[in-house]
Amino acid sequence: AATAVIVVAAGSGQRLGYGMPKAKVPLGGESILTHALRGVAAAGIARQICVAVPAGDEELELLCESFARDLGSGPHAASGGGGQVPVVTVVDGGTSRADSVRAALAALLPGTEAVLVHDAARALTPESVFHRVVAAIAAGAEAVIPVMPVVDTVKTVEPTTGESATVAPELVTGTAPRETLRAVQTPQGFALATLQRAHTAAAAFDAAQAAAVTDDAMLVELLGVPVHAVRGASQSLKITTPLDLIIAEGLLEGPLG
Ligand code: CTP
Ligand code: MG
């Protein structure tokens, strides 16, 4: 299937705290976005890579353009299964992640059949994860997500008021059975028409509903479309906090066996 990979890189990186968009933050001497784009290209599955950058960020636009040039002429052109050299498109991202995905969806090449949505912040995602997602789509799934088992016990809480609030600010309301829980990663893969339908519906959400959207698969779930899960990878961690960046630096120095 003609496959596009949307790389969302338009976030501001508040929690990382570098005072610059997270896509620009250095990791092993290169930007987080450079690592992410290289991973996507190395997987060799994309006819198009569509990158959402912070609106008007010329530095990141130039980074994408120079990456595209290197793909066409450099050693990367030979790598990747099938040897297809992807078209690289850059769009202005939006204020929410979902807005950034919608901006990228609007810029996909005609004839695109399948789309993967990937966080630039998951800069070290192994090729094998892209391949598992694409294989499930090729086998007929409309929606596929990479997941990991959850290591911590997960509880639900609600804020407390009155007397109980003097003891602690939150009251535990339940414990989800851990064996049924999965931590969700990207790239998430979809039949293009399915993801378009999901995002069209989400564009009409009110502010509270929109704020609750944390991935693409949950929008597809709302349509009642089955979402399939394949194995993710610990190297796919989302670089969110300074601790995550330390872990990512460590992975670059000596990858997990
Ligand atoms: N993202 C995006 N557009 C937004 C918000 C987020 O493209 N308006 C992207 C980020 O660039 C990132 C991915 O979505 O690759 C996951 O978001 P997150 O880890 O939250 O990144 P930031 O929003 O940049 O970080 P923070 O929430 O700490 O500010
Ligand atoms: Mg964010």
Image (cartoon, grey):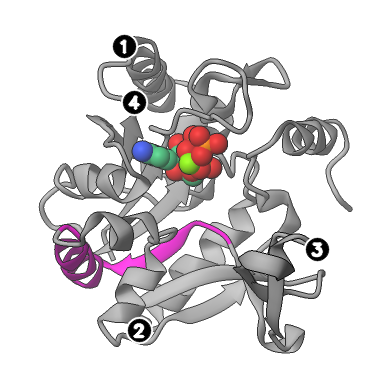
Using a 10 Å C-alpha cutoff, classify the residue at mark 4 as few (fewer than 14 neighbours), some (14 to 19) or many (20 or more).
many
Instruction: Give the Cα separation between the discs numbered 2 and 1.
Output: 39 Å
Q: Secondary structure at mark 2?
A: loop
- Beta carbon at label 2 within 8 Å of ligand 1: no
Q: Earlier in the sequence, mark 3 or mark 4?
A: 4
For badge 3, the amino acid type reads: Val
The residue wearing badge 4 is 54
- Give the mark, 1 or 3, whose residue is nearer the N terminus: 1
Tell me the number on the disc at residue 140.
Answer: 2
Q: Is residue 37 above or below residue 208?
A: above
Q: Kindly give the residue lying farthest to the left in the view shown.
A: 110
Lower sequence index among marks 2 and 1: 1
Q: Amino acid at mark 2?
A: Gly
Residue at point 74%, 56% (across, down): 234
Q: Which residue is mark 3?
A: 167
- State how far apart marks 3 and 4 are (Cα): 43 Å
> Circle 1 sits in a helix, a strand or a loop, which is it?
helix
Hey, which quadrant is residue 164 in on the image? Answer: bottom right
Residue occupying the point 72% across, 89% down: 177
Q: Which residues are magenta?
A: 185-203
Q: Is residue 191 magenta?
A: yes
Q: Position of residue 101 (x, y in %)?
A: 29, 48
